[in-house]
Amino acid sequence: MVCRTRKQERSVRTRTALIRSAAERFERHGYERTKLSEVSEGAGVTTGALHFHFRSKADLAEAVEHAAIRNLYRAARRTRCDRTDALAELAAISYSLAHLLHRDVVSRAGFRLNYETSGRTRLSIHQEWQSCVQRLLVQAGEEEGARLGALPLCELADTVVGATTGFALLARDNRAWLSPKVLTGFWRAVLPDCALESNGGGDC
Amino acid sequence: MVCRTRKQERSVRTRTALIRSAAERFERHGYERTKLSEVSEGAGVTTGALHFHFRSKADLAEAVEHAAIRNLYRAARRTRCDRTDALAELAAISYSLAHLLHRDVVSRAGFRLNYETSGRTRLSIHQEWQSCVQRLLVQAGEEEGARLGALPLCELADTVVGATTGFALLARDNRAWLSPKVLTGFWRAVLPDCALESNGGGDC
């Protein structure tokens, strides 16, 4: 029984290493140019071991996407804390997701794969983000209309979704696009009357 | 001689039709899933004719990228007019490029290919756009610092580049992201004291 558990643990470790290695290569060379032999080499396993866990490159890409979705949801959920202010919650989630995408290559690669190839997984990350932004801005509008200024909420939501998605996709070339500095600049530009600063980049 | 010219004209028409057909398929299915047989069928030519013009799918993608770069530069140049106000020029160029990307599938597909696969062409469209935004905002800062508000120019530039790139990339699922309404909302959100409205979406 002990033996079997160790085997299972090793299997989970190998699978995790393969997902990470694939994510690194997808980010560096793009999905199309990534070779499975390089993925297995990066994870320190044989191509046979890779094929034991994943049937194909598409299968690996799906696993990277699912891991990214899980990580992003977890980070967003953890950022709720005891905030009752919807605007502060929205900003905190944006900092938390940017921080995760900045430091974790699996989340970054999964986000990009999800955007570039729609339909591999059922869930569209940027559409989920759009729903989250719209919901929190409507709530913020009810709480404190004046601070949001004269701009209609739907236009503000489009600006927030467009800019944050743009930052995440531009980060492929330069991760500084996901730094707290860029995000703070953005929040100051669109909502100058609210102090929506980073709380250090991580969870609250 | 006449005969030769007609032949040349036909050749140019076939090449243009192949580039358009490839762009349509790259946008609909992604580069990876696009089949050359579908591209030639969409252009109404044989696969032999396709291979006469393009050696490979990568070669076709490069042609789509080059056509997009040409179209985007031409649209930006035409939008200069007699404007002396750098901020108005920047907004007008943003409307003009969004209008082109909205209506022209070759420009849209080429922009996305250029973003997704860096290194196929020497030029990075979003980096060129970033330089253009930075240059015009510095000029605007010298002309009329007060209207730009208290935000440092580099942060304003990041916000403009991030959001507009985000709109162009999100338009893959929904072209409404490139509508004048979204762009007008964005300019009103970041520069509420300037009336940076669309002049109809096209050239000025």
Image (cartoon, coloured by chain):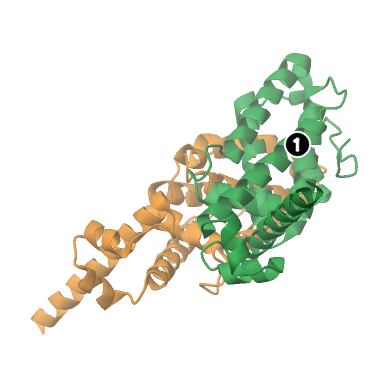
Chain colours: A green, B orange
Q: Position of residue A165 (x, y in %)?
A: 64, 45
Viewer-closest of A111 and B116: A111
Q: Position of residue B71 (x, y in %)?
A: 43, 61
Q: Residues within 10 Å of mark 1 (few under 14, many from 20)?
A: few
Type of amino acid at the residue the image marks with label 1: Arg
Pick out the residue farthest to the bottom. Answer: B1
Identify whether B150 is placed above or below B142: above
Residue at 62%, 63% in the rendered image = A49
Question: Does residue A102 appear to the left or right of A157 in the view shown?
Answer: right
Question: Does residue B12 appear to the left or right of A105 in the view shown?
Answer: left
Identify whether A92 is placed above or below B83: above
Viewer-closest of A192 and A179: A179
Q: Quadrant of the N terminus of chain B?
A: bottom left
Question: Does residue A20 appear to the left or right of A127 in the view shown?
Answer: right
Which residue was labeled with disc 1?
Answer: A74
Tell me which chain the residue with mark 1 is part of. Answer: A
Pick out the residue farthest to the front. Answer: A1
Q: Position of residue A27 (x, y in %)?
A: 64, 61
* Residue B152 in view here: no
- Classify mark 1: helix, strand or loop: helix
Residue at 75%, 36% in the rendered image = A74
